[in-house]
Amino acid sequence: MGTASGPLPSTASDSIKGSVGQIRDDRVYRETRWLSAIIIPFLLVAFYILFLRPTETKTLFAWEIKPTMTAMMLASAYIGGAYFFARALFAKKWHWIALGFLPVTAFASAMCVATILHWDRFIHENISFVVWVALYFTTPFLVIATWFRNRRTDPGTPDAHDILFPQPVRYAVGALGVVTLLISLLLFISPNLMISVWPWTLTPLTARVVGGMFALPGVLGLYMAIDGRWSSSRITLESQIVSIAFILLAAVLSWSNFNPSSPATWLFVGGMAFLLVALPILYYTMQMRLKREASTMLAN
């Protein structure tokens, strides 16, 4: 496992510079924090509606979501997103949170396109619909613009005390990202095909929404594999663990929505259960290795 080769410069004047003189001091721009602060309340309200009152979406949300598993899975994505943006709001370095912005862009873009394709399925009289449209017709552009702007400060090197993912882990995470993205694309491009095999009832709209939810971890997995720095992945991995925990809780609470005779049911539940075990183990292993490496460097 690779480690950081040495401490980064501590002053802006000594920071690594880009090819056009841009100071790569890894700072988080003020606008990035503003965007994070604005997004968090919307995610928390949506989580409250979809997870705690999933049978009331006809009156409380942008469209009526059935069955409850779909609503609660979307809520699980939102609570993970709220955790991520809360961490982004107070992050000390840009590269600690950078990995989360492209996956969020993919998810928000999918929601935007799904809204356009299924405009008639939404309840236009609900204030939640107005909020939904305002968010998903702007968020993809705001998030990707924020990523493009703030990424100029990333030196592209590990922290002073940092480690890299082992190559086998990067390959595994990248492969998982590819598989997840393929599922996402099938849900979005061929919703009727996926509806026929999905473990609970979907409509073309909810199939595409679920596809957007799969796009998020898919893009994240590829990005983690490419970047390789543990410091870059830690916060986004934490947010994924939060989401997966709530997805499994949603599956328990909405078990009547599932078809127990379908292999897809056990693939979905088993896959989520595996991730809820494997990801914390990976997190703990990397943190322990980081502490050992830091102790060794301090001793030397």
Image (cartoon, rainbow, N blue to C red):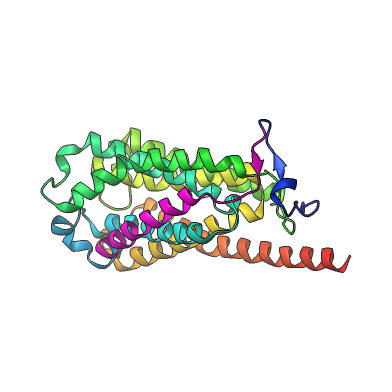
Q: Position of residue 274 (x, y in %)?
A: 51, 60
Residue at (27%, 57%) from the top-left corner? 71
**Can you tell which quarter of the image residue 163 is in?**
bottom right
* Residue farthest toward the top in the current orientation of the protein: 20
Q: Which of 46 and 70 lies nearest the eye of the viewer?
A: 46
**Can you tell which quarter of the image residue 282 is in?**
bottom right
Q: Is residue 182 visible?
A: yes
Residue at (50%, 42%) from the top-left corner? 147
Task: Please indicate whether residue 117 sits to the left or right of residue 73 in the image.
Answer: left
Q: Which of 78 and 210 lies nearest the eye of the viewer?
A: 78
Residue at (38%, 61%) from the top-left corner? 79
- Numbered disc total: 0
Q: Is residue 47 magenta?
A: yes
Q: Position of residue 273 (x, y in %)?
A: 47, 62
Q: Is residue 62 visible?
A: no
Q: Is residue 84 magenta?
A: no
Which residues are the magenta region?
Answer: 21-50
Q: Quadrant of the C terminus?
A: bottom right
Residue at (51%, 38%) from the top-left corner? 148
Q: Main secondary structure of the magenta part?
A: helix
Q: Position of residue 205 (x, y in %)?
A: 25, 42
